[in-house]
Amino acid sequence: MEIRYDFEYLIHLLYCAIHDVQPQEKPAHISFENVFELGKMHEVGNIAFLSVDRLREKPEPALYNEWQVFYFHSVQRNARQLAEYGAITKLLTENDIRWTEAQGTVTKTIYPHPEWRMMSDMDFLIDEENIPKVREIMTALGHEVHYKENENEVNVYPEKGTAIEFHHDFFTEFYEGSFERYSGAMNSPFLHAVPDEENSHKWILDTTYYYMYTLLHTIKHYEYAGCGIRRILDLYYLRKTLSDKVDHDLLEAAFEKYHFTALRDTLFALEEFWFEDKPADFDLTETAIDIVRSGNHGTADFFLRNSLRRDADDSMQKAKLRRMKRFLFPSLEELYEGHPAYKEKGYSLLKCRVLRAAEHFRPSEIKKMLHFFKRIKNS
């Protein structure tokens, strides 16, 4: 393809690495610095380095060395996370807690080299009744532990090492009351898993449900705050390694019922265009730009824009006015969520709003509030 933009050259480098072919030399108008920054932003810079290393005209020495260090760091991080994974799963087993997995720790195994698939945290699915137990265990170990009461999950942040999240379901319904589509399509992980032959506390998720979860998780990120290039590369390896092992009738029925089919097909088309060199039957420009701009974990601006679009049943202007009203006059539930101390003291809705208003009229907060309204206006 014609390489016009920095992100297109990054995609080209990734394509050449995964297909083991010689990359095209960098076009004069492309910036190695920008390509590297995009690679880091999307957590694929380590894979891109494998192609950069095959170029005749490499980046200037300082940048090349930094890129090479980034690659070696991904290898080291993978080894460290593997050790951390072993320690966590041993702890779960010793405390009679069963678990299963559906995110990065599994997705690594479908890549040709696990260090290629960078992972920012580790996610485990456990029985809901074990959430308090895990919280106590992790707190006793001296880790920083955050308990999200509204979703009944535990987030653990070791002083050194990888963050860990413990969930009791694939999707929760709290998130702006709009996760019913996802939780309706699939939930109750242990109904779709079986015990591992060597460790009865470790449950292996059915291939069809892992495949479905990966698709839905990617769609969720895209619909809410944006998803990055790495997640589209996940789809490439997902289809390449598992597509012929899943129940597609079950998948199609769920995706049709909960209205995921169109977006799924769009993301598949982009995956094929980027990583299989297959032309699309429709314009993918807007989708590609959204993914590139959102980075691997999405952005606050994309979250705001997408939530306004979902709320714009009558008009975008009315959706923006409703969002401003909601910001100025939040519900008691939202106030309790943002200010746990209000909930602990049992403050009324009126008192919560007065206290919050007093906070927002400090000079530093006024600036943030005006910025928020500007973002709404420009969304």
Image: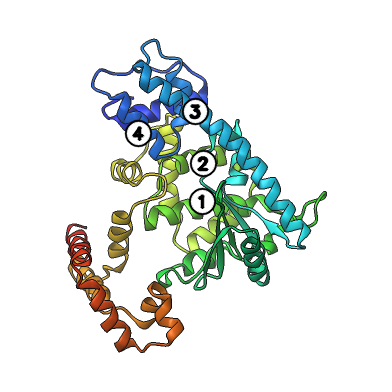
Question: Given the image, on which type of amino acid does mark 4 rest?
Answer: Glu
Question: Given the image, on which type of amino acid does mark 3 rest?
Answer: Tyr
Give the alpha-carbon distance from disc 1 to disc 4, as whole Å.
Answer: 26 Å
Mark 2 in CB contact with mark 4 (< 8 angstroms)? no
Location of residue 58 in the rendering, given as x and y in whole percent from the top left corner: 37, 15
Foreground: disc 1 or disc 4: 4
Q: Earlier in the sequence, mark 1 or mark 4?
A: 4
Q: Going by the image, does 198 lie left or right of 110?
A: right
Residue 215: which numbered mark, if any?
1
Residue 71: which numbered mark, if any?
3
Question: Given the image, on which type of amino acid does mark 1 rest?
Answer: Leu
Q: Quadrant of the C terminus?
A: bottom left
The front one of 136 and 126 is 136
Give the alpha-carbon distance from disc 2 to disc 1, as whole Å.
Answer: 9 Å
Location of residue 47 in the rendering, given as x and y in whole percent from the top left corner: 48, 29
Circle 4 packing at 10 Å, graded few (<14), some (14-19), many (20+), is some
Q: Going by the image, does 97 lie left or right of 213?
A: right
Q: Earlier in the sequence, mark 2 or mark 1?
A: 1
Say which residue label 4 marks: 37
